Image (cartoon, rainbow, N blue to C red):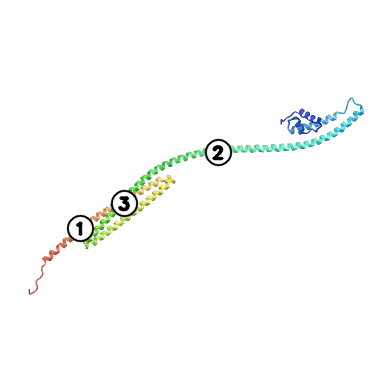
Amino acid sequence: MAVGVPETDVFAAADAVLARGERPTVERVRLELGRGSPARVGALLDQWWEQLAQRLRGETRLPGLPAEVAQAFVAVWQQASVLAQGVVEHSVAAQREVLAAEYERVAGVEEQARRDIALARRQVSEAETARENAATRLADLDKLLAQRQVQIEDLQQQRVELQGARSELQADVAALQQALRDQRQQAEHNRLAQEAYVRGVEERSHREVDRVREDLKARQLEAREQQKQLEALQKRLEETRSALGDAQLQAAAREARSALAAEQGQHALQQLETQLRSAREAQEAALQAAIAQQARADTLERQLIQQHALKPRRSRVRKPNPAPGG
C-alpha cells in the first residue's frame, strides 16, 4: 500500500463509512480508500474523530425552526453528541490498542528485518572472506601442483637413469657369475690334477711320497681355503645381489637415494672382482708350486730308479769269501 495518503482522502472515506451507518475503523477506512498504511490511517482517523466532535458541538442553532423545537432538537443533539463522544472514545481506545499492537508487530518485524539484514551482511562478509581464502588456497594448490609436477618429472628421469644403471649392474653380475663358474671349473681341474699327481707320486716313491703328500695336503688346504674364499666371494656376491635388489626396491620408494646405493653396489662389485683376480693369481701360484713339486717328484723318481739300477751291479762285484781249508 502507498504510504503518506492525504488526510482529506482519509476524512472523506470516514464520512462515507459513517454515512452508510457504520462505525469508521481503520480497516473499513482503508478498505474504502483502497490504500494507506494502518499507522497513517489510524493517526488521521483520530484527528477525524476529534474534528467530528468539534463539528457536533458547533451545531448549537437551527435557524428556521421554532424556539421550542430548536431547543428540543439541540438537547437531543447534545445528548447524541455525548453518546457519540463516548462511542468515539471507546472506539479510539480500541483503535489505539490495535495501533499499539500493530506498532509492536511492525517494530518486531523491523527488528527481525534488521537482524536478518545484519545476519545477511555477516554471511556475505563471511562468504567473501571464504571466497578470498578459497582463492588463496587455490593459488597455493596450483603452485604445489606445479612443484609436484616438476618433482615427478625429476623422479621419472632418475628412474630412467636407475634402470640403465640396474641393467649395467645386472650385466656385471652375470659376468661375475660366469667368472665364478670358470673359477670353480679351474679349481676342480686343479683338484683333479692334484689328486692324480698324488696317486702318481704314491706309486713312484714311498719315502718321498709322505713328504710330497704333506706338501700336497698343504696345497689341498690352500685349495680348500681358496674354495672357502670362492664360497665367501659367492656369498658376498649373493649378498651384493640381495643388497642390489633391496636398493632397487628402495629406489621405487626413495629414488633420491638409489643412486648412492647403485654406486655402493658398483664399488662392492669392483672389490669382488679385485678379490677374484687375487684368488686366480693365488691359484696360479699354487699350480706353479704343484708343477714344481711334480718336477721334484720326477727327479726323485729318477734318482730312485738309478739307485735300484745300481744295486744289482754292486751285488755282482762283491765276491764271497773262500771257506777255510778249501
- Direction from residue 149 to residue 25 in the image, left or right: right
CB under 8 Å between callouts 3 and 1? Answer: no
Q: Amino acid at mark 2?
A: Ala
* Quadrant hosting residue 108: top right
141 to 321, vertically: above or below: above
Q: Secondary structure at mark 3?
A: helix
Quarter-wise, where is residue 45 in the image?
top right
Counting from the top left corner in percent of width and height, residue 76 is at 88, 32
Circle 1 SS class: helix
Q: Earlier in the sequence, mark 3 or mark 1?
A: 3
**Tally of numbered discs:** 3
The residue indicated by pointer 1 is: 298
Residue closest to the eye, 73 or 146? 73
Residue 42: x and y, percent?
76, 33
What label sits on residue 140 in the rendered view? none
Query: At 40% across and 49% down in the image, what residue appears?
Result: 245
Mark 3 or mark 2, which is nearer to you?
Answer: 3
- Which of the two labelled residues, at mark 2 and mark 1, occupies the earlier sequence position? 2
Q: Which amino acid, mark 1?
A: Asp
**Which residue in the protein does label 3 denote?**
181
Q: Position of residue 164 (x, y in %)?
A: 38, 43
- Residue for point 34% across, 52% down: 234
Q: Is residue 326 above or below residue 281?
A: below
Q: Amino acid at mark 3?
A: Arg
Task: Provide the residue designation for mark 2.
Answer: 134
Label 2 environment density (alpha carbons within 10 Å; few <14, some 14–19, many ≥20): few
Instruction: From the viewer's side, name the closer residue of 21 and 160.
Output: 21
Question: Are there few (<14), some (14-19), or many (20+) residues within 10 Å of tag 3?
Answer: few
Q: Give me the C-alpha separation between circle 3 and circle 1.
A: 33 Å
Measure the C-alpha gap from mark 3 to mark 2: 67 Å
| 44 with respect to 141 (left or right) | right
Label 2 – label 1 distance at C-alpha:
97 Å
